[in-house]
Image (cartoon, rainbow, N blue to C red):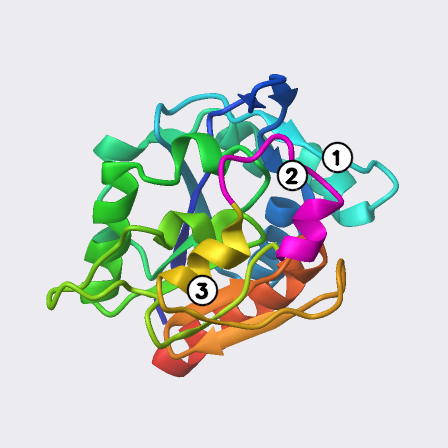
């Protein structure tokens, strides 16, 4: 049986908003899904809009999964990420967008990202994201012109969570924008793990949901085998 491959698309943005808040990807939102995929024997590769270094936020050295990832060859590969324009998503079985505030700077509204998501979706690939990562889906339209998320069950960082975290720094409210695009949005209580799976579209609400997203990707890849 051939090894499955998942492409993680990661932000290069190190600051956000009018106060230049330090940001990047949120560390557990890569470390936790990676741990699940790695244990399942699924290969992970990393790309970013600019390639190279990917700044991070929210590292907790008391979390064994985060500590292990920081010390891994995968983390070193992450910081030599491939440039997105040089990647063909059809070489992968799934694509995943981790969150953090950084994606709202250089992933959201990025034509290369939108084209990648559309190409992956049209090819029958699994498309996944967690926390602020579903912002990558905004502006992605299908062949008939409808938004990718319209009529589909989705989650992502909630309005209630943003109000207590980064309201003054973000350019838009993710929950509201997903709803406006026609997504059937659902959230759990703030900071509680929550997963939504709608066919090949997999989304997690917040940092606590990364492991659930990883497990859902593994299950989807196995069922597609």
Assess disc 1: are there few (<14), some (14-19) or many (≥20) residues with their C-alpha within 10 Å of its C-alpha.
some
* Place of residue 118 in the rendered image (x, y in percent of width and height, measured from the top left): 22, 56
Earlier residue among tags 1 and 2: 1
Mark 3 sits on what residue?
179
Q: Main secondary structure of the magenta part?
A: loop
Mark 2 sits on what residue?
167
For the N terminus, which image quadrant?
Answer: bottom left
For the C terminus, which image quadrant?
Answer: bottom left
* Place of residue 202 in the rendered image (x, y in percent of width and height, measured from the top left): 47, 68
> Which label lies toward us, 1 or 2?
2
Name the foreground residue: 128 vs 15: 15
Name the foreground residue: 217 vs 72: 217
- Magenta range is 158-172
Mark 1 sits on what residue?
59
Q: Are circles 1 and 2 on residues that touch, CB within 8 Å?
A: no
Residue 111 in the figure: left or right of residue 45: left
């Amino acid at each position: 049986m051939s090894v499955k491959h998942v492409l993680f698309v990661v932000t290069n943005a190190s600051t956000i908003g009018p106060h230049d808040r330090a940001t990047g990807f949120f560390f557990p939102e890569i470390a936790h899904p990676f741990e699940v995929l790695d244990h399942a024997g699924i290969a992970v590769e990393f790309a970013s809009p600019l390639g190279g270094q990917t700044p991070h936020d929210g590292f907790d050295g008391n979390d064994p999964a985060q500590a292990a990832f920081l010390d891994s060859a995968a983390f070193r590969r992450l910081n030599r990420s491939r440039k997105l324009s040089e990647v063909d998503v059809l070489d992968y079985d799934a694509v995943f967008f981790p969150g953090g505030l950084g994606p709202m700077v250089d992933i959201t509204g990025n034509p290369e990202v939108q084209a990648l998501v559309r190409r992956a979706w049209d090819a029958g690939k699994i498309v996944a994201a967690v926390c602020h990562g579903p912002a990558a889906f905004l502006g992605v339209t299908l062949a008939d012109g409808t938004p990718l998320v319209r009529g589909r069950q989705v989650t992502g960082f909630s309005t209630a969570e943003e109000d207590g975290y980064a309201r003054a720094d973000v350019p838009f409210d993710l929950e509201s924008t997903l709803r406006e695009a026609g997504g059937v949005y659902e959230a759990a209580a703030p900071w509680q793990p929550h997963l939504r799976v709608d066919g090949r579209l997999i989304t997690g609400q917040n940092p606590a949901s990364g492991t659930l997203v990883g497990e859902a990707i593994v299950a989807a890849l196995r069922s597609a085998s």
